[in-house]
Image (spheres, rainbow, N blue to C red):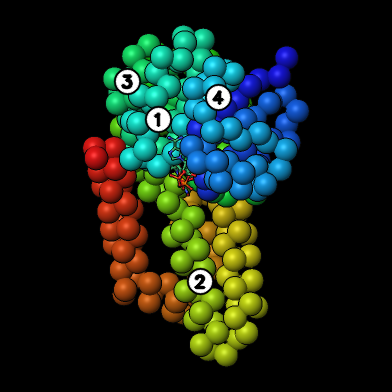
Amino acid sequence: MKKNIGFIGCGKMASAIINGISTNSEYLIKGAELNEEYAQSAMKRLGNIEVITDNTELVKTSEIIFIATKPNQVVEVLRGIKDFVTPEKLIVSIAAGITTEKIEKILTNARIVRVMPNTPALVKLGMFGVCAGSKATEEDENTIISILSSIGKCIKVEENQMDIVTAISGSGPAFFYQVIEDMARAGEKLGLDYEKSLTLAAQTALGSAQMIFNRDQTPVQTLIDNVATKGGCTFVGISEMKTQNSEKMFYDVISKTTDKACELGKS
Ligand SMILES: NC(=O)c1ccc[n+]([C@@H]2O[C@H](COP(=O)([O-])OP(=O)(O)OC[C@H]3O[C@@H](n4cnc5c(N)ncnc54)[C@H](OP(=O)(O)O)[C@@H]3O)[C@@H](O)[C@H]2O)c1
């Protein structure tokens, strides 16, 4: 039997997830968008997926329902579907800042799993932080992890850590794009062709991330030291990062983003 999975909101993040999991023949995926024009364009973008304009119809016909609208649209969506969320349905919220407690105030008996995804799910290299609401079981969490594992890595976290996850991996792609772009532009200013410089920076980011996953017990500092031989050119670059206090800059980036994620849930 195919699993019916519905997505309320088929924007950027939902599309990345749908594109990744829709190739699995075990799932029957459907989407909903309020606006007819958006529904039509989402259908075009997503290929074989039906996108309707009635959230309640989507809920009635789905076993697992992803809430994938902007955080400030979530409460309105929940109010609209609450009478149709029966106990056998599993609700998955991907909205930044919205706690399962807040969702449970509207969907009082619902089993809720909260997920913080990121857009590299589109290329099956997503990162997902996962936690469960008070009525969801470990099996519910594992069901969602097994769906998302085909398009990235999943880690279980405590709900009170979710805003930090949002900052590091939810927003993280934008930070890495910025770093890669800045490195590429520096290369360009120093005389390299921009596209070549961008390839050098992006492939180096990809390879370095893979080295971290392959490192076993080796501390990351050892990986740094292996490249930055004392007195060599990388050592000069690392010293400049220290002089400019990159650690503080990244702390501020992550902590300010975390604070904003927390605020999103309150508004
Ligand atoms: N983008 C990311 O990188 C990322 C990463 C992690 C988590 N998230 C989370 O993912 C969620 C979606 O973000 P996004 O970037 O994908 O936003 P988005 O592109 O704006 O997608 C949201 C979609 O939901 C539609 N929508 C709004 N109200 C609706 C309703 N009542 N019923 C059905 N559809 C409705 C929107 O249509 P309208 O435009 O007409 O309102 C829009 O097409 C957010 O809560 C965000 O926190 C995003």
C-alpha span from label 4 to label 2: 40 Å
Q: Earlier in the sequence, mark 1 or mark 3?
A: 1
**Which corner quadrant of the image does residue 69 belong to?**
top left
- In which quadrant of the rendered image does the C terminus lie? top left
Label 4 Cα crowd, 10 Å radius (few <14 / some 14-19 / many 20+): many
Label 2 Cα crowd, 10 Å radius (few <14 / some 14-19 / many 20+): some
- Mark 4 and 3 residues: CB-CB less than 8 Å, in contact? no
Amino acid type of disc 1? Val
Provide residue 39's location: percent of width, then percent of height. 58, 41
Q: Identify the residue at image location x=62%, y=30%.
A: 30
Q: Identify the residue at image location x=26%, y=47%.
A: 259
Tell which of 216 and 195 is nearer to you.
195
Amino acid type of disc 3? Ile
According to the picture, the residue beneath numbered tag 4 turns out to be: 58
- Vertical arrangement, residue 21 with respect to residue 190, above or below: above
Provide residue 70's location: percent of width, then percent of height. 40, 42
Label 3 Cα crowd, 10 Å radius (few <14 / some 14-19 / many 20+): some
Amino acid type of disc 4? Leu
C-alpha span from label 2 to label 1: 37 Å
Mark 4 C-beta to ligand 1 under 8 Å: no
According to the picture, the residue beneath numbered tag 1 turns out to be: 77
